[in-house]
Image (cartoon, grey):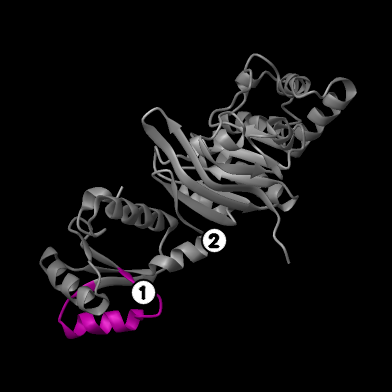
Amino acid sequence: MTTTYAVLSEALEKRYGDVQALRGLDLAVPEGTVCGLLGPNGAGKTTAVRILATLTAPTGGRALVAGHDVTLEPAAVRRAIGVTGQYASVDTDLTGRENLRLFARLTGLRGAAGRTRADELLDRFGLAEAADRVASTWSGGMRRRLDLAAGLLTDPRVLFLDEPTTGLDPAAREQIWTAVRALADQGTTVLLTTQYLEEADRLADDIVVVDRGRTAASGTPAELKARIGSHAEVTVTAREALAGAAVVLDQLTGGRPALDEERLTVGVTVADGALTLPGIVRALDTAGIPVTDASLRPPTLDEVFLRLTRVRRAEHAGRHPDQSQEHAA
């Protein structure tokens, strides 16, 4: 079965004077999926989205959105996309209904068609009851949902979401996550940039990690986690036992255990299937290392992200990724 890609870029490059923001970025986002675009600040995420949304032109490579070349067919791309920026762009002096009707007119939906579409979206995002109150009286989560609704007025095939839940409380974030997942289930392709790795883990079908303007890694959240193995951690009874526990874990894994003197823990990456928790506990007991807790779990996406970007930066500097802790962030 042939996969149809809603967003596709090949060797995408962008230079701003002496700054190379993108250095050959490759993306392939299947239709009807959520793709999480992750990376440290300055990695090139925003530049990539600006190119894909036809807000700036690439200096190399090519990109297709909804089957249209962003350089050769920008008008067709704009008709196919919706864009929601990092901060809500609603006018707080207008009511929710007035905001959506204004955006509808700006996107070419006029008269009854615009009013009907605005009312549909207010109802869809649970905002109908507050629709005739000025937006300044709304919560941050409500305004963010209104902003998301505005991006859907034209029923876009592809939606670009930039940091959709920045500054929101957990309940409001959950509401946005539910709305985004529902969009993908209904066939909209979502390209999501976020600093909340839990958000990407919850929402994304696939994740692309961007670092230094290139694709550092890509795959499903499960595939990326499997790439770095599981995480073993033991808690010892006293600080004096940390070094001994680290030696045991080093011998078992060949890794570089990390010691936390405040928490009295030693942690290390373990290749999947290489060790079992009972095996770790037996080895510590044989060595006479007193422990109060031990765990073996899959890595979090935060740990995957840090590991992958750490490796890329270490390679760029010509050193082993574990030789310098300053490259872990």
Give the residue type at disc 1: Ala
**Residue at (35% x, 53% y) in the render:** 306
In the image, 244 versus 310, the foreground residue is 310
The residue at which mark 2 appears reads as 220
Residue 13: x percent and y percent? 48, 40
**Rendered view: 279 above or below 245:** below
Task: Please state which amino acid type lies under the numbered disc 2.
Answer: Thr
Say which residue appears at 72% left-offset and 27% top-offset: 130
**Label 2 secondary element:** loop
Q: Earlier in the sequence, mark 2 or mark 1?
A: 2
Q: Residue at x 62, y 18 (%)?
A: 92
Residue beneath disc 1:
271
The image shows residue 69, relative to residue 185, as above or below, that is above
Quarter of the view holding residue 285: bottom left
Rendering coords of residue 172 (x, y %): 57, 39
Residue 260 placement, left or right of 302:
left
- Residue range highlighted in magenta: 269-291
* Foreground residue among 312 and 62: 62
Looking at the image, which is closer to me, 318 or 31? 318
Find residue 315 and report its horizontal and vertical position in percent: 29, 55
